[in-house]
Amino acid sequence: MADEEDELPETELSYDQKKEIAKWFLLNAPAGEINYVAKDLKAVLSDEEVYNEAAMEAFPVYNKSHMICLEMPSRAGDVIVSSYSEVTENEYLDPRTAQVAIVDHVKQICTKVRPANDEELPSLYIEEYRYALDAEIQRYVSESYPKGMCAVNCVKGKDTEGPGSDFELVVIITAMRLSPQNFCNGSWRSVWNIDFQDESQVLDIKGKLQVGAHYFEEGNVELDAKKDFQDSTIFQSADDCAIAIANIIRHHETEYLASLEVAYSKLPDNTFKDLRRKLPVTRTLFPWQNTLQFSLTREVEKELGLGK
Amino acid sequence: MEAALGLLRRMPPKQSETALSALLSLIPQHSSDLLSQVDLPLQVLRDIESGKDFILCEYNRDADSYRSPWSNKYLPPLEDALYPSSELRKLEVEANDIFAIYRDQYYEGGISSVYMWEDDNEGFVACFLIKKDGSKSGHGRRGCLEEGAWDAIHVIQVGPEDEEMAQYCLTSTIMLSLTTDDESSGKFGLSGSIRRQMKMELAVADGHLCNMGRMIEELEGKLRNSLDQVYFGKTREMVCTLRPPAEIVQMRLPDT
């Protein structure tokens, strides 16, 4: 590894190579920091063309994976940019207001909205379930997340007219806290896939939670935590399903938060100890001045064949 | 350069090697600056003659070879290579032995190396390195960690002796990463790096090793606590800000 770094590249990097590197930096920016990364990247690249092309390709991927929320004009609320709400690369559906938001990925803004047309919206039957679930989730999110945003999208079977077919709804919950002046940023992303299975009359629920935090005041530390969940409930009326699903989500997320707290509390005395103890087993500082003890210890270690 | 360092500060700590290679290829004209300001996880080589591992860094490198602190030989062998003076080498040997014991007491495993060389100011520079793999498949005694790495680099500049005192300037860098993976909390990973300095003027009578050792022990302890309480603590605070723990789990029952 050290050898590789010492070698200077023989030839200039190609346009494509530079672009791929630029994209890598953008895509790996922590939540809420892509614009700072972009600024530094532009300075390092000093090549507008490469940067612009890399940005055009990287920003949409970043925005969707971080599920950024963009404010829609005329106080219509926020739209969540995600692969579940994507209509085309620059258009995202907000099912709550039945509008499609047109976005500029690189600027990270919503430029305008238009009403969604019929093909983009789910059927009345599906909408009943989606609407009820959305209402329950909104209630849950407003109770549990100080700055959370949520959406429910239908990703499969949206044209189903009535019972007899399967369909799938996705619940997205996202919360971001950005405090660059305190050198601290964080994000929470939950994605819950609810598979409504008609034949077995069961709802198969799969959840993915991802929490990240970045603290970088005179140092650089990052938290990266994730967990997958699995649960199920019975296929009932739209309202009853909504309540059951929200309860399941609430239960798992609350439990997860509690177990994260446990993981943190175990750090100083347990987990961290596997890396470095606070003090030696003797509970005293190392006796640097006692050279006689060292010679003895060295002899003992040699005798017993200890130490590397 | 500022921008390059800014980028490195924002990239995930686990990806710092990839980030650095990417930057080196984009701005090769700044490579020596970058390499001297950025620390990467330490690499290790085996000294077959002594049967021990040693840590690689800029301070024991000459061309493409590295000097083992155990045998004092370069691997791969190198003609006309740089060596510390015999007096300094004696101190270096003692330092390696003592530091290995220190390492064992605090790290219960791992690898350590110490390198010394004369500097231009009639003093010398010593570099103390530790690398620990704390994962359950490595030297993690309690089996808590799926993955765990601690790399410590302590560089001390020792000034010339003046009226029985000497100036010691220590720069310590710690890089660490840990991941736990269990039923209840899923995959939980923390990683990061931190660097601090400490300057002291101490009596030479106690011995250079004793003085340097005490400073390293003190700063390492401070950094460990800081990482644990301040740095990791801030990320914990952030999680609780995003989603405060619910005192009571509110369950909504269907209206009958």
Image: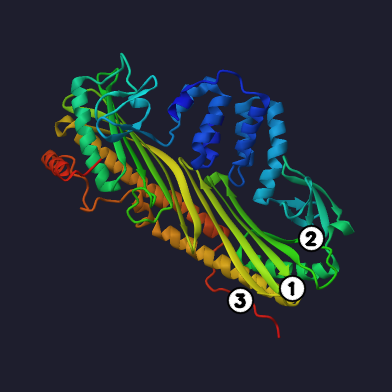
**For the residue carrying disc 2, how many other residues have a C-alpha within 10 Å: few (<14), some (14-19), or many (20+)?**
many
Amino acid, disc 2: Pro
Q: Residue at x 45, y 31 (%)?
A: B38
Question: Which residue is denoted by mark 2 in the rendering?
Answer: A95
Q: Chain of mark 1?
A: A
Q: Are marks 2 and 3 on the same chain?
A: no
* Up/down of A207 relative to B32, above or below: below
Q: Chain of mark 2?
A: A
Q: Position of residue B118 (x, y in %)?
A: 27, 21
- Give yes or no for contact between labels 3 and 1 (Cβ–Cβ under 8 Å): no
Element at badge 3? loop
* Up/down of B189 relative to A230, above or below: above
**Counting residues from the N terminus, which is met first, the one under dot 1 or under dot 2?**
2
Q: Residue at x 65, y 50 (%)?
A: A66
Element at badge 1? loop
Question: Which residue is denoted by mark 3 in the rendering?
Answer: B251
Question: Which residue is denoted by mark 1 in the rendering?
Answer: A199
Give left or right: position of A89 versus A265. Answer: right
